Amino acid sequence: MTGDASRRTDSDDAPRRAGADDDAPRRTDSDDARLRVDGVEVARYVLAPDLDPRHGPRPYLHPVRTLAGTVVTDALPEDHVWHLGASLAVQDVAGSNLWGGRTYVRDAGYTWRDDHGRIVHTGWTERADDVLAHRLQWRDPAGAVLLTEDRRITAAPVAAAPGAWRLELRYALTAPVDRDVPLGSPATNGRPGGAGYGGFFWRAVAADPPQVFTVDADGEESVNGADSPWVALTGTGPDGGAYTLVFTGLGSGDRWFVRTAMYPGVCVAFAFDTPAVVPAGGSRPGRHTVTVADGILDRTAAAALAAEADATAEPGSDFPTGHGSPGGHGSPAGEDFPGGHGSPSGLGGPAGAGVPGGPA
């Protein structure tokens, strides 16, 4: 469902701090890590943002830049303050909101509730210019652990496209041994209109509404909810620089959640129209890539970058071990981690949604 100007974003009644920099996360430089490609800083990883709990505090990448320096992410935007660059976030994790904003309640709509959890860094496993790997806990509002996570983020040049670089995110979400952990979205909780957001979400920034397309579809209405092997988004950054983002990495049951009219965003959605479950003692792995290129690429060029991203995938040899080693969807932790499109890549997906009378 395409967004329009009549939709309400709830920026007016979102909780905000007092002061001129209400929603600027308070942190020290030591809290943040950087990713570099051939010596060029391409992304900052905000590890522990000091945010209102109702903004869904979690580690996130922002700003992310092209090699020429154009910023291609947004964080804490006025329309949806809880959108934080590129991050993993889910609105319904066993009843806790780890997305931020109001929670969609069946038969009631979007409602402010004291149900906000947070995703917390608990220790590094590797940290270098091109690799950030660490362990995390997904916690409910009382601080109890819902899921544990191993996460690995890498940045590398793209050999086939000298003006581009690729971000790869690998992770495994692991449930406690004594209980399943269900994952849901506003759509699975009763909201109509294709609002199945939640997973690996990329909040882009664009001076004008961007263009979005897949191998065989164009535009938000056609692409939202699709299960195409890749999605491309083209836009113009705040500095006037044109860019293209090519996303890959749907897992079994995942769908693309896409917005362009209300705001620019792409998500690998875990529970687009059906709830997902991380089974007791099992892990749900994910592998998602985003190729970040300067300039506007056409469908042929985007398809080539997507194919190259999948061709370079390795079956898990570089994924961190520890609590929750990668396994298949619903498989015991520790099995081989599959790579490439069409293999289980987890409930990956940030998501965002512009919705009538409710946030995303």
Image (cartoon, rainbow, N blue to C red):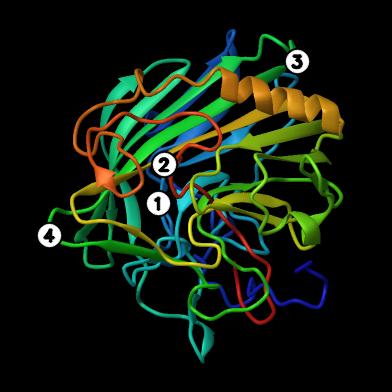
Residue 312 coordinates in the image, percent (x, y)? 55, 17
- Comes first in the chain, label 2 or label 3: 2
Residue indicated by mark 1:
50
Q: Give me the residue at 52% from left, 28% from top.
A: 168
- The residues bearing labels 3 and 1 have C-alpha atoms spaced at a distance of 35 Å
- Residue 163 badge: 3
Q: Amino acid at mark 4?
A: Asp
The reply to whether residue 169 is in sight is yes
N-terminal of the pair, mark 4 or mark 3, is 3
Place of residue 101 in the rendered image (x, y in percent of width and height, measured from the top left): 51, 69
In the image: residue 343, left or right of residue 120: right
Are the residues flagged by discs 3 and 1 in contact, CB closer than 8 Å?
A: no
- Marks 2 and 4, how far apart at CA: 36 Å
Kind of residue at disc 3: Gly
Disc 3 or 1, which lies upstream in sequence? Answer: 1
Contact between marks 4 and 1 (CB within 8 A): the answer is: no
* The C terminus lies in quadrant: bottom right
